[in-house]
Amino acid sequence: MNIRNLGTLAPHTQLLGVATLTLLMSMSVNNAVAQTFDRSIRAAENREPTIPRPDQDRAVQQKLAALKAKTGKRPNILWLIVDDMGYGDPGCYGGGAAIGAATPNIDRLARGGLRLTSCYAQQTCTPTRSAILTGRLPIRTGLTRPILAGDKITKNPWNDEISLAKLLSGAGYYTLLTGKWHVGEAEGMRPHDVGFDEYYGFYSAQKEITQSKDPRRFPDLVNNPARLRAFEAIKPDDHLIHGFKGGQTNKVSQIKSIEDMGRADKELTDFTVKKIKELADGDKPFFIEHCFMKVHCDNFPNPDLGSLSAAKYYYKEAVAEVDRHVGEIVKSLESAGVLENTFIFFTSDNGPQMDGWPDAGHTPFRGAKGTTFEGGVRVPGIAHWKGMIQPGRESDGLFDLMDLFGTSLQLAGVSTDKLLDDRYYDFIDQASFLIDDNGKSKREAVYFWWGSELMACRMKEYKAHVKVILPQTTHLHIDMSTVQNVGLAPWLFNLYIDPKEQMPVGHRRNAWLAIVAGKLKTHGATFKKFPPKNIGL
Ligand code: CA
């Protein structure tokens, strides 16, 4: 790879910044060295390059075929997505009882399966939630930032996006999304409009709902009748919605108080548990995406459950409650006799929202939700499959949550050949990484975006930033931060010796800067043929 060749640059790689490009032009890397470092191969121009692992792929194909022969059914897929949980919150990631909220059920899930330590989300909710269902980066679908009250989208991104739920539903799976959606609540954008057979949940985040119910936190709205009336026109739906493919949409109940909000996750968990019992007896395999409302601020304790944490703070109560529900859902799989035929993946959709502190989680890394430093994007990632994934495995192999898209298709036996070639796909099928006893990641690079800005790239233990989000005060990574170009050289960190990204190893002390930064250039060039989509966000 010769990064002197900038002639192929797409207009969008202007995002890299003039100074950075100047530096890149001054570097060149021996082709052979570059190919040894970057082992990935691009199979098609619209697919993310993949590290070939033919042996583990074959072994896992055989393992999957053997299970199917035994059960007579394709496997169930269950995603457990927590909102805004920090990498350091669960006990198995260094938190738990040590920071005031024990997480025995999440820890048990990790001990019984594979604990990923380099698992990446996008830096906010909507981008991650849409990316994992489309296998495509937010910049490609237009869902580049959270949809908030009052937002008017100019184009429904789902008009031409194809969700995993649609693909799995079409392949004979029963598809259900329980809980938080946050990818649009207008007709045509709801879960049951975009491929899910059934939806039972809330369209938006907890704070979006409770800002008109909580007089202590929002007195200028809640105690001002005129403003409250005006807010009615733009507020997100505050009902628990039960929707079905075809359009039937029922309002089950309304959140009228912070106590109601506090009870929501228990109600959602009870629904998922009930559905697992029903679906386990049916003919179809199922795909359930269970999205917790907690632990996104503002958190309110469930008044029916009593105190659950040692810390007593609402955030900690929320972590402990989510853990309890994780335990209930996993137990329901076991009781229904389908634990051995269900792939479970537990994660968070982004890092902790420090802007909400102390109603916020813990990350050992720099930054938080809203930034592309590790604190914003590195999240817990636990893959569990009794009898299929060896208990106690750990891996630092790169995993992007978008890989859940390709992995789930593989598990369901849906060929990725069915995907369209008019668009770029960023996912990698990581089934063999997650399932093989000695599985290695097939991903060589993770790219980090903030809105429509290309920010950074991680390869191996190196991460190069060409733009950064810098908070202008201690912990306001969203409300008081700036996006900045880096200077002459990208900020290159070695995450193994500097996990907090504070000591750049730069162009003076690292041989790989040109390759990592060059990977960004190659990534940017994919937008030349496959341009980004703008939906007015
Ligand atoms: Ca989130």
Image (spheres, helix red, strand yellow):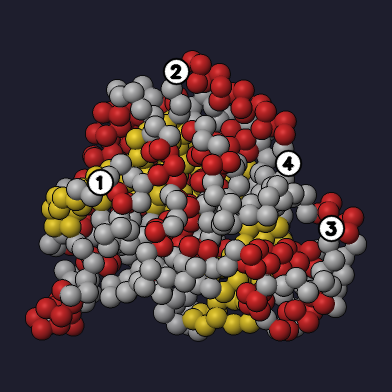
Of callouts 4 and 3, which one flags the residue occurring earlier in the amino acid sequence?
3
Which mark is on residue 246? 1
Q: Looking at numbered disc 3 in the image, what kind of residue is underneath it? A: Ala
Q: Nearer the viewer, mark 3 or mark 1?
A: 1
Residue 491 figure quarter: bottom right
Upstream in sequence: badge 3 or badge 1 = 3
Left-right relation of 75 to 397: left
Query: Of the residues shown, which amino acid type is indicated by label 2?
Result: Gly
Secondary-structure class at tag 1: loop
Spot occupied by residue 485 in the image (x, y as percentages of width and height)? 63, 82
Q: Is there CB contact under 8 Å for labels 2 and 1?
A: no
Q: Is residue 40 visible?
A: yes
Which of label 3 and label 2 is nearer to you?
Answer: 2
Secondary structure found at label 3: helix
Query: Label 4 belongs to which residue?
Result: 52
Label 3 – label 1 distance at C-alpha = 51 Å
The disc at residue 72 is 2
Of residues 358 and 201, the one drawn nearer to the viewer in this rendering: 201
Q: Which residue is mark 3?
A: 34
